[in-house]
Amino acid sequence: MKRVPVAVMASGRGSNLKAILEAAERGECPVRVALVISDRPDAGALEIARAAGIAEVIYLNPRDYADRQAFDAACGGAIEAAGCDWVVLAGYMRILSDAFVRRFAGRAINIHPALLPAFPGAHAVADALEHGVKVTGCTVHMVDEKLDGGPILAQTTVPVLGDDTAETLHNRIHAEEHKLYPATLKRLAEETFHLDGRRVIWNS
Ligand code: GRF
């Protein structure tokens, strides 16, 4: 199986990284995670990456860099040095500089725990719950200069239950993310698409 080399950037517990690695291991996702970068030394994603034997697992401290641009340039350098074709954001909590977004234009994707364009930002699950929506979900989208604003590649819905807390709802969204992200990566590896305005049109 030809595998696409990808870099995963993650700040948190890393369950999406784990889902991608497990799907790849099962032969269901033709990617090779060549590099994992985190901006947090205690990110669970780093542990998961090390345990999985990922070739390069890097923690970069944003405070070691003059500004966002310099930090992102270091991340970009590591991604290119590792020969990664794509950048996969999986719970990466830093806003990316425009220069980074341009550098990886068309090659960077993100997963968000809501049905975009509803509830962008860092508190999507709580915001959706508080708003009272009956259905929410998760979105995989291209990364562009607008936060959580790039063209949508895939979405899955999740019903909101009467007794949901942000935690129970996020748990069920996570379960769907763990299927949607590997499936979307597989599709990206095996198919092509073009953009019609903001619409992602798969060519198959
Ligand atoms: C996910 O819910 C993702 O949608 C959001 O951050 C969370 C990351 O979870 N961007 P994990 O670190 O992959 O477990």
Image (cartoon, helix red, strand yellow):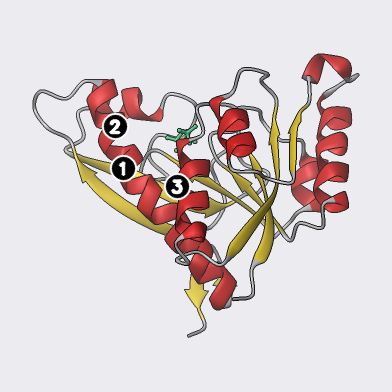
Using the image as rendered, state which of residue 151 and residue 62 is in the foreground. Answer: 62
Q: Which mark is residue 175?
A: 1
Q: Is residue 194 visible?
A: no
Using the image as rendered, state which of residue 175 and residue 1 is in the foreground. Answer: 1
* 3D distance between C-alphas at marks 3 and 1: 10 Å
Residue 20 rendering spot, x and y as whole percentages: 50, 51
The answer to whether the residue bearing label 3 lies less than 8 angstroms from the nearest atom of ligand 1 is: yes
Q: Determine whether, in the image, residue 107 is placed left or right of residue 158.
A: right
The residue under label 3 is 19
Contact flag, marks 1 and 2 (Cβ < 8 Å): yes
* 3D distance between C-alphas at marks 1 and 2: 6 Å
Residue shown at 45% from the left, 47% from the top = 19
Using the image as rendered, state which of residue 28 and residue 201 is in the foreground. Answer: 28
Q: Amino acid at mark 3?
A: Ala
Residue shown at 42% from the left, 59% from the top = 154
Specify the farthest residue to the top: 63
Residue 3 rendering spot, x and y as whole percentages: 64, 68
The residue under label 2 is 171
